[in-house]
Amino acid sequence: MFAGESKAAESAFMRNLDKTYNIIWATHPRHLPDAPSGHVVVLDVAFAADSQYKIKTMPLIDALGDRLHYWIDHHYHPEAWERFSEDPRFVLVPNDIAHACPELITEELVAQSSDEIDTIIAHCDFDGALSAVKWILGGKEPWPNADEDGRAVDSPGRGHDLTPRGEHIALAMDEIYSTTNTQNRLRYMTELVWAMARDDWPEDFKHKINLFAQRAKEKERLAEENTRDLGKFESKDIYVVRLERKLDNQDRKYYLVAAENRARVGAVIEKEPKGGNWITVATFDPTIDLAQIKGLSGGRTDYRFARAKKGGHQQLIKIQEYIDQVDSQQKSDD
């Protein structure tokens, strides 16, 4: 495993693998944990949207102070990122460059402070979990092409290839997120991190993961069918699926991918149980920066969400107008 590497690198790797990190999950940019004790690294956790970062994200940063060694993320936030652009604790690379967070967890970066870190705060998804695993492994991939798996899962449609192992674990995580309560979800995610890091899969745990992955695969198939049957083009470049119910985050992802595969922008509009609608849009097209569109407040450059006023029609109009402007600019540049 360590052929051609220095003894120092091997030693650091083994120290990290044997170390018991305190893993704390951030389930949403607005739902952050209280600042833990000890020395902390934060992985794949976005700054809360718009000015919400001042009342959601900043209290955690301020409470950690010098105990925060790194905040590593790829969810672009123009105002907040500008504020921390000169702070060496913050490794902030936008999604159009870093298609997933694990690729930012390098051996060189981990080596600078790995002995001091005792707590990892990570986004509770495949991208965040794999980032935590790479930190535990001193910046090494837990299996060949794991970084590419992170990119394929977190930035689908951008030409990345997903390994069978990566797909299996990602599907299982989707189903865990959809069907378990918060306590069990976080427990499963922590167990998965250590199973991936140590490549140690107890039979009972492996059986459960297999069942989760099978169920998620079936949901993915149903989302594809429903997107085909219920969706339509509501403008020339936007394929829209309108649903009478609110989805969980993982099911929504399946619908979005199915819609994106049909158009330059995919949109899912869901009815809220208490009235109103939410719109979520996503694109595989690297020329489209959805963060430039007013009325889509949260997310990143290729994925945005917001409350949908009047069924989201005005937001869809703004998206199409933006796409037309991008195309027009490209033609004039050519």
Image (cartoon, rainbow, N blue to C red):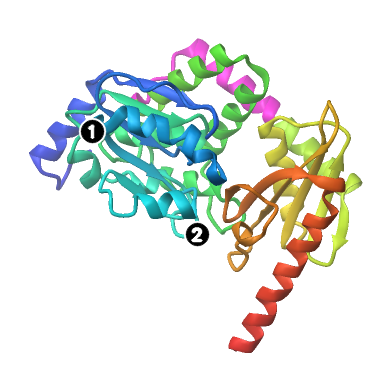
Q: Is the residue marked by circle 2 packed among few (<14), some (14-19), or many (20+) residues within 10 Å?
A: some
Q: Position of residue 23 (x, y in %)?
A: 38, 22
Q: Nearer the viewer, residue 192 or 119?
A: 119
Residue 195 in view here: no
**261 shown above or below 136:** below
Q: Secondary structure at mark 1?
A: helix
Q: Is residue 308 left or right of residue 206?
A: right
Amino acid type assigned to the residue bearing label 1 in the image? Asp
- The x and y percentages for residue 32 are 48, 27
Q: Main secondary structure of the magenta part?
A: helix
Residue 66: mark: 1
Query: Which of 36/191 is in front?
Result: 36
Instruction: Residue 294: say if magenta.
Output: no
Report which quarter residue 65 is drawn in. Answer: top left
Against 180, residue 121 (above or below) is: below
Q: Residue at x 35, y 49 (%)?
A: 84
